[in-house]
Image: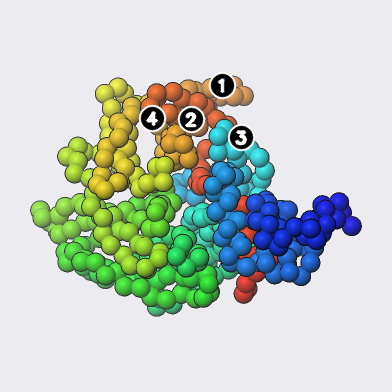
């Protein structure tokens, strides 16, 4: 018998049960997985939703978090074609230094995993090469378990967008799937929501006023759709009208995972033009990033808007040689990738890219060593998916 097990048995014989359980809830996941073997009561208790949630709250309060990053599968460059494409890297959220590597334990028909989102240490993936995103997986690397979700309840899937979030009121994880129509003019998209607790999908209505003259719309998928303050958010870009009446517009669609209701959010009142824009999160709030041309050649202006009671523009940053905006760290630093100078390799000139953390306050830049084109998300250890229907261990 191991020394920790002996000590814990002695402790349980001399301490009140509530004190023992209070100690257990503060332990890391790897220790809790071992301690499930101590006795039947601990085995059952550690698997209860209440204990899993309390352990998660303790980890959140004590900043036991990391970043996880993986090659991005958007645009013309698909990094998953490389040998290490099935690998996710866990890194320090302070320095981005690699701590460990995690191999994705399931495969897709196309061979290209698409990262949907991360929530409390649960990662959601789908099939990148399919416009239907039919196959969806939830994966908890810290307990080495994953689950394939059941089939859709929608009758038609086309140009699908997915979001992943946590229902704090019901202690439940949910996936939202939105599918476009091919009809002209384009009607509102169809939507469904998956609940981990019920292990099933159900249709949900959009419930908002849809513009009658929309001839085309698409979801801005520059980044993973942000889950902020209990809501998932999508940027929808539209073409309204035709001929000389044609105009390009945008809207923000928000979904409350607790009430399972959609609503439309206003865009900032900004007259300035932009090249592109995207939604993300900034220090726990919804943020809109807009890029416009700078004064200098190869320079862009990055405007950061943050949603409180209303939209507030908090910074406008000049960024030179920008090739990819990745997101913000927990501490509000921008993570971007830039084009660097030409370098000579094997008597040939090659342009290298570099990843840089930028402090919006001081504009100080720090180069970090990560791959080109990334999906990045917060990550932490969690016991969710410990037990349940159709959960696979590996």
Q: For marks 4 and 2, give the CA distance.
A: 12 Å
Q: Is residue 202 toward the left or the right of residue 247 in the image?
A: right
Asked if labels 4 and 1 touch by Cβ distance under 8 angstroms, the answer is: no
Q: Is residue 28 toward the left or the right of residue 13 in the image?
A: left
Numbered tag placed on residue 356 in the rendering: 2
Image coords of residue 317 (percent x, y): 33, 29
SS class of the residue under badge 1?
strand
Which of pointers 1 and 2 indicates the residue nearer the eye?
A: 2
Label 2 Cα crowd, 10 Å radius (few <14 / some 14-19 / many 20+): some
Q: Quadrant of residue 382?
A: bottom right
Q: For marks 3 and 1, give the CA distance.
A: 27 Å
Residue at horizontal 34 percent and vertical 56 percent from the top: 234
Q: Which residue has dot 4 on it?
A: 360
Q: For marks 1 and 4, give the CA distance.
A: 33 Å
Asked if labels 3 and 2 touch by Cβ distance under 8 angstroms, the answer is: no
> First in sequence: mark 1 or mark 4?
1
Image coords of residue 371 (percent x, y): 56, 38
SS class of the residue under badge 4?
loop
> First in sequence: mark 2 or mark 3?
3
Q: Which residue has dot 3 on it?
A: 97
Q: For marks 2 and 3, give the CA distance.
A: 13 Å
Asked if labels 3 and 4 touch by Cβ distance under 8 angstroms, the answer is: no
Label 1 Cα crowd, 10 Å radius (few <14 / some 14-19 / many 20+): few
Image coords of residue 269 (percent x, y): 19, 44
Q: Quadrant of residue 209?
A: bottom left
> First in sequence: mark 1 or mark 2?
1
Residue 129 in sight: no
Q: Which residue has dot 1 on it?
A: 344
Residue at horizontal 49 percent and vertical 23 percent from the top: 342
Numbered tag placed on residue 37 in the rendering: none
């Amino acid at each position: 018998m191991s020394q920790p097990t002996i000590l814990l048995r002695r402790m349980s014989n001399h301490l009140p049960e509530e004190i023992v359980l209070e100690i257990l809830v503060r332990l890391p996941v790897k220790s809790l997985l071992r301690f499930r073997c101590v006795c039947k009561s601990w085995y059952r208790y550690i698997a209860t939703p209440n204990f899993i949630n309390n352990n998660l709250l303790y980890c959140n309060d004590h900043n036991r978090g990391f970043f996880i990053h993986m090659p991005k599968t958007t645009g013309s460059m698909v990094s998953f074609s490389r040998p290490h494409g099935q690998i996710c890297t866990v890194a320090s959220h302070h320095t981005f230094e690699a701590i460990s590597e995690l191999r994705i334990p399931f495969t897709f028909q196309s061979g290209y995993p698409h990262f949907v989102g991360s929530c409390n240490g649960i990662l959601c993936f789908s099939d990148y090469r399919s416009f239907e995103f039919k196959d969806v997986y939830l994966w908890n690397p810290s307990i080495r378990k994953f689950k394939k979700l059941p089939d859709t309840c929608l009758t038609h899937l086309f140009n699908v967008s997915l979001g992943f979030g946590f229902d704090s009121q019901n202690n439940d994880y949910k996936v939202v799937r939105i599918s476009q129509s091919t009809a002209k003019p384009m009607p509102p998209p169809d939507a469904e929501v998956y609940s981990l607790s019920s292990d099933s999908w159900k249709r949900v209505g959009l419930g908002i006023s849809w513009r009658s003259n929309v001839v085309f719309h698409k979801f801005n998928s520059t980044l993973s759709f942000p889950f902020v303050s209990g809501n998932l958010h999508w940027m929808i870009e539209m073409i309204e009208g035709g001929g000389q009446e044609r105009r390009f517009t945008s809207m923000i669609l928000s979904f409350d995972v607790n009430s399972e209701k959609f609503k439309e959010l206003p865009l900032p009142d900004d007259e300035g033009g932009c090249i592109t824009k995207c939604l993300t999160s900034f220090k726990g709030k919804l943020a809109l990033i807009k890029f416009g041309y700078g004064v200098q050649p190869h320079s862009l202006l990055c405007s950061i808007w943050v949603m409180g009671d209303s939209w507030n523009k908090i910074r406008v940053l000049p960024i030179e040689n920008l090739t990819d905006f990745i997101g913000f760290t927990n501490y509000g630093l921008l993570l971007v990738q830039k084009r660097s100078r030409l370098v000579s390799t094997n008597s040939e000139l090659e342009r290298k890219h570099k990843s840089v953390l930028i402090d919006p306050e001081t504009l100080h830049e720090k180069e970090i060593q990560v791959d080109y084109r990334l999906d990045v998300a917060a990550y932490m250890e969690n016991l969710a998916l410990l037990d349940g229907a159709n959960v696979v261990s590996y």
